[in-house]
Image (tube, rainbow, N blue to C red):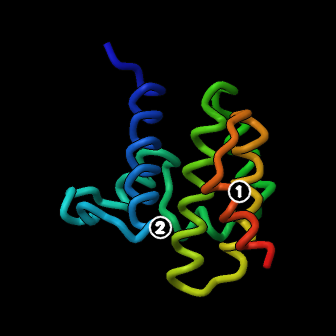
Amino acid sequence: MITDKEFTLRLIRQLTQALEKLILDKPEESLMQKELDFETLMRDIFKFDFTTLSSKTKEEIIEIVNERQERDHKDYYEMLGNLFYFNGKANGNKDFLDKAKTFYELYLQTSGIFALPIINRINELKN
C-alpha cells in the first residue's frame, strides 16, 4: 500500500523530472501534454499554490522542508531549485533565481551527490 508520504515523494520526483526537461530545453513532452497540472501538483505537494510558495522567504520554505522526513529533504531541495530556476528564468525574477541558488546548494549539501549540471546552474546564478 502506498502511503501519503510515498505518493508525495513520487509527485516531487515527477515534477523535478518534468522541470529538468524544460530547463534543459529538451522537453520530450510539455507539462500540458503529459497532462500534469502544475498547480494541482503544487497543491498536492505543499497544500498551496506556487504563488503562495514563492511569496514565502527562503527560511520559511526551508522550515517547510524541515517538517518533512530528513531522508526526503534532498528531493524537496532539488525540486525547489528546479522550480525557482525555471520560473526565475521564464519571468526574469531575480528573487526566484536567488532562491533557486539557495535550494540547489542545499540539495548538494544534503544529497552528497556531485551533480555537475546543478553546480553549473549555481555558477551561472552567481554571475
Point 70% across, 45% down: residue = 107
Residue under label 1, please give it.
Answer: 119
The disc at residue 65 is none
Above/below status of 14 relative to 80: above
Which amino acid is tagged 1? Ile
Q: Earlier in the sequence, mark 1 or mark 2?
A: 2
Element on which disc 2 rests: helix
Above/below status of 10 relative to 84: above
Q: Choose top left, top right, bottom left or bottom right for residue 25.
A: bottom left
- Residue 80, percent across and down? 60, 55
Q: Quadrant of the N terminus?
A: top left
Point 64% across, 55% down: residue = 118
Point 23% across, 62% down: residue = 29
Point 72% across, 77% down: residue = 95
Q: Is residue 102 left or right of residue 27?
A: right
Instruction: Kindly report the distance in space between the C-alpha atoms of the residues bearing marks 1 and 2.
Output: 14 Å
Of residues 79 and 112, the one nearer the viewer is 112
- Residue 35, percent across and down? 20, 58
Element on which disc 1 rests: helix
Q: Choose top left, top right, bottom left or bottom right for residue 97.
A: bottom right
Of residues 53 and 70, the one nearer the viewer is 70
Q: Is residue 70 left or right of residue 43?
A: right
Q: Is residue 119 left or right of residue 11?
A: right
Which amino acid is tagged 2? Ile
Circles 1, 2 touching at the beta carbon (< 8 Å): no
Callout in the foreground (1, 2)? 1
Residue under label 2, please give it.
Answer: 23
